[in-house]
Amino acid sequence: QVQLEESGGGLVQAGDSLRLSCAASGRSFSNYGMGWFRQAPGKERELVAGITAGGTNYADSVKGRFTISRNKALDTTYLQMNSLKPEDTAIYYCYAHVYGNEYYWGQGTQVTVSS
């Protein structure tokens, strides 16, 4: 079974850092784009960061604070989050873009930033 599993979320204070991990199983995603999106209660889903062979992209709200990277050998994608703000509070989901309109995503990991 194809799965993506996020980990690394938690409760932190403003200004702290977290590193999220996304581990793939069931198949390799090393040849496809990976990324992260988030959703907070009452807010629209937001694409946070993506990484492909062509490079990386970030939402304006996280540029300069978040960094996406991947280890293809381990089939794992990371999101380093620095200088966290209360508005970063959300459930963070990892996604894999396999086909033109086919995506996989995990169950998410909760990130809560207190002021």
Image: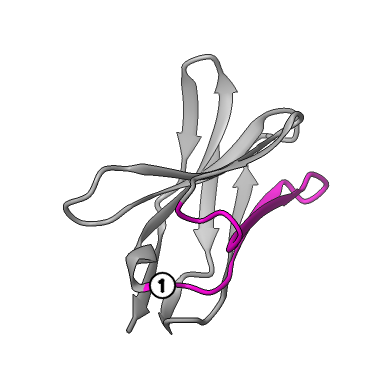
The x, y position of residue 5, in whole percent, is 52, 53
| Residue at 51% from the left image edge and 56% from the top image edge | 62
Q: Is residue 108 magenta?
A: no
* Apparent side of residue 32 relative to residue 20 in the rendered image (left or right): right
In the picture, residue 91 is in which quadrant? Answer: bottom left
| Residue at 27% from the left image edge and 56% from the top image edge | 40
Please state the total of marks drawn on the protein image. Answer: 1
Q: Is residue 80 magenta?
A: yes
Q: Nearer the viewer, residue 63 or 23?
A: 63
Q: Which residues are magenta?
A: 61-85
* Apparent side of residue 38 relative to residue 43 in the rendered image (left or right): right
| Residue at 42% from the left image edge and 81% from the top image edge | 14
The x, y position of residue 38, in whole percent, is 39, 51
Label 1 environment density (alpha carbons within 10 Å; few <14, some 14–19, many ≥20): some
| Residue at 72% from the left image edge and 46% from the top image edge | 75
To which residue does mark 1 refer? 85
Q: Is residue 24 above or below residue 15?
A: above
